[in-house]
Image: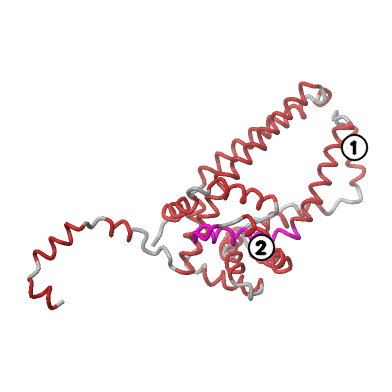
Amino acid sequence: MLKARDFRRYARESLRGRWLKAGGVGLLASLLGASIGTNFYNCVSGNSGSATGGSAGSTEILDSFYASSSIPAMFFAVVMGIALVFLMYTIVLLVIGGATTLGYAKYNLNLVDNKDPKLKDLFSQYNRLGTGFGMQFFRALFVFLWSLLLVIPGIIAGYRYYMTPFILCEHPEMTAREAITESKELMKGNKWRLFCLEFSFIGWELMAAGVMLVVVMLIMTPMIFNGNAIMDSMGVALILILLVVLIAFVIVLGLTLSPYVTASIAVFYREISEGRYSNPHLEAEAGEYTYADVESVYEEAPVQDIIEE
């Protein structure tokens, strides 16, 4: 049975010579809302409480916050404008994110199958916007319902439906619900293995999260403790530099870690659906035998036995 290191090794072999291209496609896919796992659940329900409730006193709260803060009016207006843009961007992602997920799954399957993956694979499923949205919606709904019981059942449910994008992109005749059911069957006995595979990347992810946290804190500190002077040239320059550093880090992370993780998961899917890599050491063992070894075997064997064979 393959271990996490085996899946990672096959992923590295698939990415050899294609790492930068795969990273670029992965970065674009994430910007377009692709989510191979069930991270869509966080986007849908994680901040739902902040979008509703308290509407009666929202104006008073904003007025009180603005009056008591030292943040300049122009800066506040810019922040609100950015928030509006991100709201519109989120709505667009809700529409195209599922189809992008299917396209990204197809790209990674072509990658591990050595079928010359192309950027157009990412957009190849945009004729299935309804199916993609249904896939993301039902996965999010089922995980949310299981999470109402306890956190652990919700996590297990997330792994249960993990393979849905791969199944759906390979079987266009299936509906979203049928692919979710198929993923549930496929992941029986494999949920812990997938968890171990994802956990094997924890060191890289913690390091990335730590760097991003430090940069964000460096950006926010001048705003909190030096609000009156935030529009000074020095303060603006510092914030812009830190933002550039953060964006550059996210891009580098997307070009390196993201394709590695996703390709490993695609290899995992091929293994549990086809058993393609069931004996990862077979080729290595076969390579250990030479012509001299075979010749010595025939020298030791009786001539008559060889003729009869």
Closer to us: 181 or 131: 131
Residue at image location 53% in from the left, 51% down from the top:
261
- Residue 204 percent location from the top left of the image: 52, 42
Task: Tell which residue pokes out farthest to the bottom in this image.
Answer: 308
> What mark, if any, has residue 32 been given in the picture?
none
> Could you tell me which secondary element the residue under label 1 belongs to?
helix
Residue that mark 2 sits on? 124
Residue at image location 58% in from the left, 44% down from the top:
255
Residue at image location 85% in from the left, 41% down from the top:
80
- Distance from Cα at disc 1 to Cα at disc 2: 49 Å
Residue at image location 60% in from the left, 45% down from the top:
254
Left or right of 72 on screen, residue 86: left
Q: Looking at the image, is 264 positioned above or below residue 237? A: below
> Could you tell me which secondary element the residue under label 2 belongs to?
loop
Helix, strand or loop for the magenta stretch, by majority:
helix
- Circle 2 crowding by C-alpha within 10 Å: few under 14, some 14–19, many from 20: some
Left or right of 83 on screen, residue 57: right
Residue type (three-letter) at the residue carrying disc 1 = Ser
Residue that mark 1 sits on? 64
- Circle 1 crowding by C-alpha within 10 Å: few under 14, some 14–19, many from 20: few
Q: Earlier in the sequence, mark 1 or mark 2?
A: 1
Query: Magenta segment range?
Result: 94-116
Choose top left, top right, bottom left or bottom right for residue 157.
Answer: bottom right
Choose top left, top right, bottom left or bottom right for residue 277.
Answer: bottom left
